[in-house]
Image: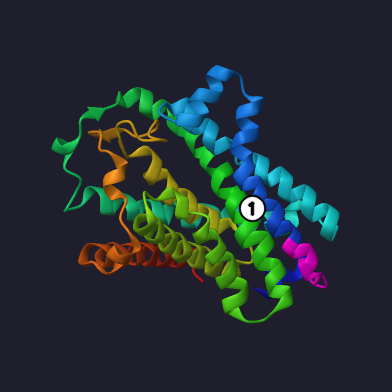
């Protein structure tokens, strides 16, 4: 971690860090509204719903705006460039490829090996050739999306907090917790949101560890990209947001059936989901660790 935090050494202004955290949280909230205001009405509708491949790609690419905002803030308040939050180019690309391939193959094995997905449960399978044609574009869009999150959480925040404290629970834990809390709204209802937030916090910790071990965010982006690739392009639910890239669609379900109260977190199904989520993150982290040989 010493190597990675070196560009931020001496920059211990906590006020500047807190200002950037507040500004970036506002950017994440207001960003979609800004995109909708910029896009023509028809493209804006596709972006908002995400039920087509083009719409989901727009959603992913829009994360590039957060990189621009972060780069401007860090330049103004810390006097350093965007690349200082990424790491050496060659090492970053090498770690990205190694972790991305390893995690992708692990997730693929989990998908096709027993108990594999039951194709009889799907109501729609999109045309295979059309789906494949989108994959190169999707990969680029996903690198933009995951890269934006990793530059902020594992790049900027991890670097700056490591300059403020040597304690791992601060420079690894706090950015990961903030990352997790930001994913709460991805769930349907309180219990589902908490499960999603805990999973994202664990994923953040895995990415934080990989960043500390390699001195760049390449492995973190590789793991994150592989995870999101399978989340977006394999299965979805008819009528749900951001299903436009999924090859297979399950029949529509009212998402409100998952609107459970926090008391259900102690139910057996919730405990099982949390344990499964933790196990999946552990397997991805181990695969990336083996791939980067750290």
Residue 243 position (above or below residue 192)? above
Residue at horizontal 81%, vertical 70%? Answer: 13
Q: Can residue 95 be seen in this view?
A: no
Residue 248 position (above or below residue 257)? above
- Position of residue 177 measured from the top left corner of the image (x, y, whole percent): 53, 66
Mark 1 nearby-residue class (10 Å; few <14, some 14–19, many ≥20): few
Is residue 17 within the magenta segment? yes
- Position of residue 6 measured from the top left corner of the image (x, y, whole percent): 75, 70
Query: Would you say 155 lies left or right of 202 here?
Result: right
Q: Can residue 189 be seen in this view?
A: yes
Residue at horizontal 67%, vertical 56%? Answer: 86
**In front of the other: 149 or 115:** 149
- Position of residue 240 measured from the top left corner of the image (x, y, whole percent): 35, 35
* Residue 84 in which image quadrant: bottom right
**In front of the other: 54 or 259:** 259
Query: Would you say 65 lies left or right of 12 here?
Result: left
* Residue 194 in which image quadrant: bottom left
Is residue 206 within the magenta segment? no
* Residue 143 in which image quadrant: top right
- Image quadrant containing the N terminus: bottom right
Query: Would you say 127 lies left or right of 224 here?
Result: left
Query: Would you say 115 lies left or right of 140 here?
Result: left
Question: The magenta stretch spans which residues?
Answer: 8-18
Label 1 belongs to which residue? 25
């Amino acid at each position: 971690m010493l190597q990675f935090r070196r560009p931020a050494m001496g920059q211990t202004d906590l006020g500047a860090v807190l200002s950037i955290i507040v500004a970036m949280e506002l950017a994440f909230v207001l960003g979609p509204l800004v995109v909708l205001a910029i896009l023509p009405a028809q493209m804006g509708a596709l972006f908002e719903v995400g039920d087509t491949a083009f719409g989901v790609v727009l959603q992913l690419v829009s994360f590039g705006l957060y990189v621009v905002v972060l780069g401007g803030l860090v330049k103004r308040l810390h006097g350093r460039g965007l690349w200082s939050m990424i790491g050496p180019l060659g090492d970053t690309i090498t770690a990205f490829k190694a972790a991305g391939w390893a995690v992708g193959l692990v997730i693929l094995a989990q998908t096709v090996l027993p108990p594999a997905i039951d194709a009889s449960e799907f109501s729609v399978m999109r045309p295979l050739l059309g789906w494949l044609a989108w994959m190169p574009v999707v990969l680029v869009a996903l690198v933009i999306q995951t890269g934006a999150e990793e530059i902020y959480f594992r790049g900027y925040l991890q670097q700056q907090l490591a300059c403020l404290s040597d304690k791992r629970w601060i420079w690894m834990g706090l950015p990961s917790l903030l990352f997790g809390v930001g994913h709460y709204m991805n769930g349907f209802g309180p219990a589902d949101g908490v499960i999603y937030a805990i999973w994202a916090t664990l994923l953040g910790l895995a990415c934080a560890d990989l960043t500390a071990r390699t001195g760049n965010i390449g492995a973190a982006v590789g793991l994150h990209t592989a995870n999101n690739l399978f989340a977006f392009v394999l299965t979805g639910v008819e009528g749900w947001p951001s299903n436009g890239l999924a090859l297979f669609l399950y029949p529509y379900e009212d998402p409100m059936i998952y609107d459970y109260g926090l008391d259900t977190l102690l139910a057996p199904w919730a405990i099982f989901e949390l344990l499964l989520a933790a196990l999946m993150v552990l397997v991805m982290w181990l695969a990336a660790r083996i791939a980067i040989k750290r």
